Every structure is written in structure tokens, then in C-alpha cells.
Image (tube, helix red, strand yellow):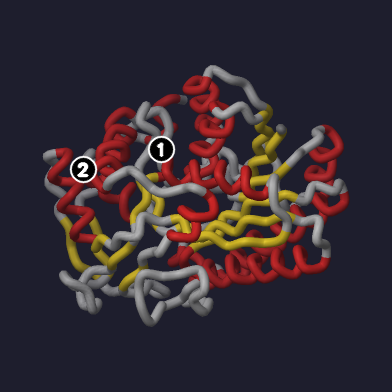
């Protein structure tokens, strides 16, 4: 079974390829490398001892996408590719709409042309907007507080319409909560270009001495310590959910939505304290203004994924911190240190 992985050089995509290869799938990966590094592809091959094809293609280039589908007989697609920073999306909304939405439309067009109708889509808990209650169920109303989340919401609607128009399509929409951590080998991990937009790589860069202190965006939220609460999930648990979703779409048609989270909420300061505890590293921080588009509390109910996909997150917050720290220590400059 041959799976096309878009965004395959990225943080989640590279971890997913490891799981796919170790479970007997053939993989073809593509990535435009706008926010990722080809070195991750090399590391995945080293970790697994298996080879696969990689193409530096952009989803917006329909001709190249079409040539790829002509060359390979794909059974399914896992679609990770997209711009993903909430704050940046507020500053650059047109870039986000063009890249994320248009890129996905191109992908669906070429899939439809070649009758590849099985798709796992990387969505986000941001589609729930600012939920009135937690935990969050898949049946909750959707909205968006930022352009990044709105692109995910638009794509979800496109995929629903596509499925309704042609019952051959089988689509799993996976709404992620907050992936952190790294592969236990320390060989691949989250590798932001420039200043990190996500919390964990910022913490690890402070701990390793690359940055002076952590910026915490707001301490006046209605939470137990005033800082934002999120559902942090280990990236390896997350990608294992994709393999379960692949199994599901190979047996079913239509479109289904699944939350992938732990069901537990931790604040920014909870994460900082846990990281310090497991690594013995003090993390200096300063409180700054809230970030545009952020909400107070967000964590999942993942009962549907457990019951339908037979998937649950198993790794603890301590595991996430340990693995993220191992990646950072062994790769203080990210993939650049290997080049």
C-alpha cells in the first residue's frame, strides 16, 4: 500500500513517516521546505533503515502534482502540508488562505482525476474557536478566532462537500490539540525556523541557552494560574492516530471527524514546571501581552477516537518533556548542526 504524505519533512509528517514505514506501508513524501528541512528525511531513513522517495514539490504547482500521480499508484494520502502559526496568520491572512486552502484544492483535484479517494486530513482544535465548555467534543459548534483556524475550517467544509458529491471518497478529518515532544531516538523533532511560534521549542531553546527567557503571552486568563490551558499530546501518540485513521478509511466511505488529544488540560506554567522537574533546568520567563487569536482553555474529549479507531494517547507530560529535551540537547541548532 503506497501512501503520499504531504508536508513529509515537517515536524508531524516526519514522525508519521517513521510509523508508516515501520508498519509496512510504502511512502512517497513531498514538501516545499518553506518551514521544514530536508535533513529530517535523511534522519527518518536512518532511524527506520528503509528508503522512500522525496520530492520538493509545492501543492500549488498542479503540473508537478499531476506528474507525481502519474508516476505512482497511490492508495491514499495523508495531508499535513500547510502554514500553521496562529500569530503569523493574523499578520499574513492572504498568504495563509492562498497556501492552505488553494493547496488543498489542488491536491483534491489531482486526487479526483486519478481516482485516489482516501484522505486523512490534518486539521486542528482551533476550528472550535473559543468553546463555551470543556472538554471539547466533535459535535461542538465550530468557528475560528484566527485566519489559521479559519483555513482549517474552510478545508473541512470543502472535504465534506467533496465527500457528499461523490460517495467513493473516504475522508478522516483529525482535529489535533497541541503536539509536542519528539522521537525517542533524539534524531528528529520540532525544528522551527527563526523564533519558535510554539511553546515547547521555545522552552527547550531557553533551556539550552539559545534564548534568554520564555515569553508567556498573558497571565490574566480565567484559569488556575492565569496562563492559557492546552491539551498537550506527544507527537508519536498523535501520528499513531493517523495509522488508525488510515485503517478506518480503507474499510469505510464518507467523512468522519476525530479529536486527537489526551483529554487533560495543562497551563503554560504547568508545562514549564514539569519541564524543569524532569530536566533539572530552570526556565526564566516574562509575562507579555496576550497573543492575538489565543483563547483561555482548550482540551479534548477523545472518546470517539478510542471507540471507533481503537486509539488513545498513552504518553505522559513528563515523557513529552524528556523527549523534546533529548532532541534539543542532541541537536542544539536543529537540523543545521548536522549539515
Residue lying furthest top: 49
- CA gap, disc 2 to disc 1? 16 Å
Residue 280 lies in quadrant? top left
Q: How many marks?
A: 2
**Which secondary structure, mark 2?**
helix
Q: Nearer the viewer, residue 43 or 175?
A: 175
The label number, if any, that marks residue 201 in the structure image: none
Q: Nearer the viewer, residue 82 or 332?
A: 82
The percent position of residue 231, horizontal first and vertical second, equals 34, 59
Which residue does the image show at 71% across and 33% down from the upper left? 2
The answer to whether residue 293 is left or right of residue 45 is: left
Disc 2 crowd, CA 10 A, few/some/many (<14, 14-19, 20+) = many
**Which secondary structure, mark 1?**
loop
Q: Is residue 24 above or below residue 308?
A: above
Q: Is residue 319 above or below residue 113?
A: above
Q: Nearer the viewer, residue 46 or 300?
A: 300
Question: Badge 1 is on which residue?
Answer: 189
Question: Badge 2 is on which residue?
Answer: 207
Q: Is residue 142 above or below residue 313?
A: below
The answer to whether residue 327 is left or right of residue 4 is: left
Which residue does the image show at 62% across and 56% down from the upper left? 172
The percent position of residue 186, horizontal first and vertical second, equals 36, 29
Residue 92 lies in quadrant? bottom right
The percent position of residue 338, horizontal first and vertical second, equals 43, 25
Disc 1 crowd, CA 10 A, few/some/many (<14, 14-19, 20+) = many
Which residue does the image show at 64% across and 41% down from the upper left? 5
The answer to whether residue 14 is left or right of residue 269 is: right
Q: What quarter of the picture does the N terminus occupy? A: top right
Residue 267 lies in quadrant? bottom left
Residue lying furthest front: 307
Q: Which badge, 2 or 1, is on the more N-terminal residue? A: 1
Amino acid at each position: 500500500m503506497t501512501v503520499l504524505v504531504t508536508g513529509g519533512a515537517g515536524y508531524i509528517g516526519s514522525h508519521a513517516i517513521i510509523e508508516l514505514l515501520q508498519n509496512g506501508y510504502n511512502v512517497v513524501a513531498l514538501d516545499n521546505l518553506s518551514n521544514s528541512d530536508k535533513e529530517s528525511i535523511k534522519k527518518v531513513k536512518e532511524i527506520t533503515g528503509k528508503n522512500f522517495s522525496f520530492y520538493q514539490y509545492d501543492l500549488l504547482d498542479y503540473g508537478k502534482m499531476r506528474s507525481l500521480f502519474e508516476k505512482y499508484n497511490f492508495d491514499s494520502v495523508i495531508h499535513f502540508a500547510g502554514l500553521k502559526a496562529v500569530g503569523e496568520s493574523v499578520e499574513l491572512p492572504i498568504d495563509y488562505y492562498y497556501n492552505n486552502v488553494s493547496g488543498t484544492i489542488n491536491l483534491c483535484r489531482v486526487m479526483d482525476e486519478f481516482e485516489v479517494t482516501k484522505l486523512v486530513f490534518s486539521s486542528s482544535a482551533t476550528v472550535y474557536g473559543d468553546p463555551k465548555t470543556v472538554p471539547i467534543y466533535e459535535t461542538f459548534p465550530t468557528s475560528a478566532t484566527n485566519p489559521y483556524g479559519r483555513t482549517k475550517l474552510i478545508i473541512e467544509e470543502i472535504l465534506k462537500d467533496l465527500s457528499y458529491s461523490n460517495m467513493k471518497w473516504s475522508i478522516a478529518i483529525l482535529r489535533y490539540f497541541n503536539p509536542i515532544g519528539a522521537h525517542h531516538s533524539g534524531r528528529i523533532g520540532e525544528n522551527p525556523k527563526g523564533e519558535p511560534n510554539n511553546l515547547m521549542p521555545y522552552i527547550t531553546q531557553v533551556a539550552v541557552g539559545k534564548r534568554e527567557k520564555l515569553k508567556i503571552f498573558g497571565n490574566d486568563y480565567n484559569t488556575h494560574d492565569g496562563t492559557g490551558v492546552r491539551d498537550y499530546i506527544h507527537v508519536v501518540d498523535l501520528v499513531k492516530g493517523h495509522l488508525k485513521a488510515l485503517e478506518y478509511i480503507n474499510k469505510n466511505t464518507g467523512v468522519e471527524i476525530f479529536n486527537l488529544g489526551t483529554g487533560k488540560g495543562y497551563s503554560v506554567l504547568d508545562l514549564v514546571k514539569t519541564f524543569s522537574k524532569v530536566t533539572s533546568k530552570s526556565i526564566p520567563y516574562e509575562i507579555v501581552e496576550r497573543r492575538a487569536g489565543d483563547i483561555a482553555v482548550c482540551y479534548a474529549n477523545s472518546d470517539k477516537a478510542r471507540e471507533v479507531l481503537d486509539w488513545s494517547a498513552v504518553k505522559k507530560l513528563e515523557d513529552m518533556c524528556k523527549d523534546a529535551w533529548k532532541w534539543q540537547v542532541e541537536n542544539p541548532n536543529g537540523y543545521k548542526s548536522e549539515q
